[in-house]
Amino acid sequence: MKLYAPKYYKKFKCIADKCEHSCCIGWEIDIDSESLEKYKSLKNSYGADIINSISAEGTPHFRLCHGDRCPHLDEKGLCKIILNVGEDYLCHICREHPRFYNFTKVAEVGLGMSCREAARIILSSPDYDVFEVLGDVAAEDEEMHFDGREERQRLYALLRAVNADYPTKLASIYRKYGISAGEDGEWLEKINALEYLDPGHREMFACYSAKKRPLGMDAFLERALAYFIYRHCTEANDEEDFSCRLGFCLFCERLLASLAATENAKTVTELAVLASIISEEIEYCEDNTEALK
Ligand code: SF4
């Protein structure tokens, strides 16, 4: 099966010690069985440190240290597993982050916006609807009655219309898919009921209003919406499912617009920080994503 990626995908490289919000802090990383076996058979002196850092409670995972840091993150922000035994010994999650995959008639890979560097690249890339083949992957062809990829491209065509401004394009998308922005009060109740990694973000998200939009950020918000659509709509099972997923994406776009207006975000870097907070709190929590859908 061919593996496709948006054109901007290849621009990404983890910035490691230069990262201001490392994914090696705050997340408990589960270790896949293949990597666990590799760690057990390591002869290198760092092998014992790796084994001692693993908790076997539930799914094996690295036990977080002070400040919720990964035990293998050094004081300079570099990964001690890479430094001591090499990149080949990263477990599956660390090797893949921040990538995600869609499987339809083809395979697609994308970059998740919880990583601020990925978010900055996504928001800076106007060619979100241009894809290229990266290679082949071993995967079964999905038996599909509905092609979310084709529907997504039709949606992108609406977003790319050159003779309309962003608010007009958004309005035509809401109309075509029969979606309404709903009542602010109902969304605020849902926002309040979500689970949060950082409780301060509940308060931050309480600024939500469908009417709040920042000035001069339309191009970036369009790219953010295109990203949400790429990530969440492609694997839809049918038209109804596609509209439901799109409703979720449009909510995420409105929340980002509300945050940008409230926080007075002026640059792509400032918007990338807000997008990564939404991604971390909502997209990377299945329960939150389902509750909002
Ligand atoms: S958040 Fe992104 S740039 Fe930062 S350490 Fe993780 S993958 Fe690298």
Image (tube, grey):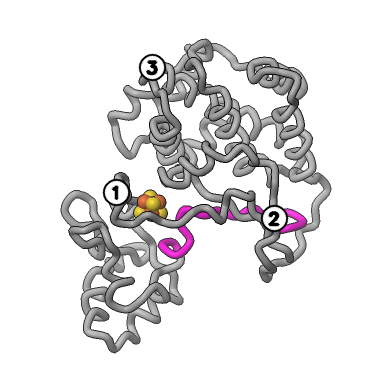
Mark 1 vs mark 2: give the one in front: 2
Image location of residue 57, percent across then percent down: 30, 64
x then y, percent, for residue 78:
27, 62
Amino acid type, residue under disc 3 in the picture: Thr
Q: Position of residue 151 (x, y in %)?
A: 77, 38
Residue furthest to the bottom in view is: 43
Q: Which residues are magenta?
A: 93-106
From the image, tell me which residue sits under label 2.
132
- Label 3 secondary element: helix
| Quarter of the figure with the N terminus | bottom right
Of discs 2 and 3, which sits in the foreground? 2
Amino acid type, residue under disc 1 in the picture: Gly
The residue carrying mark 1 is: 26
Look at 22% across and 84% down and name the residue there.
Answer: 45
* Element type at mark 1: loop
Which residue is found at the position 64% from the left and 34% from the top? Answer: 245
| Image position, residue 273 (x, y; %) | 39, 35
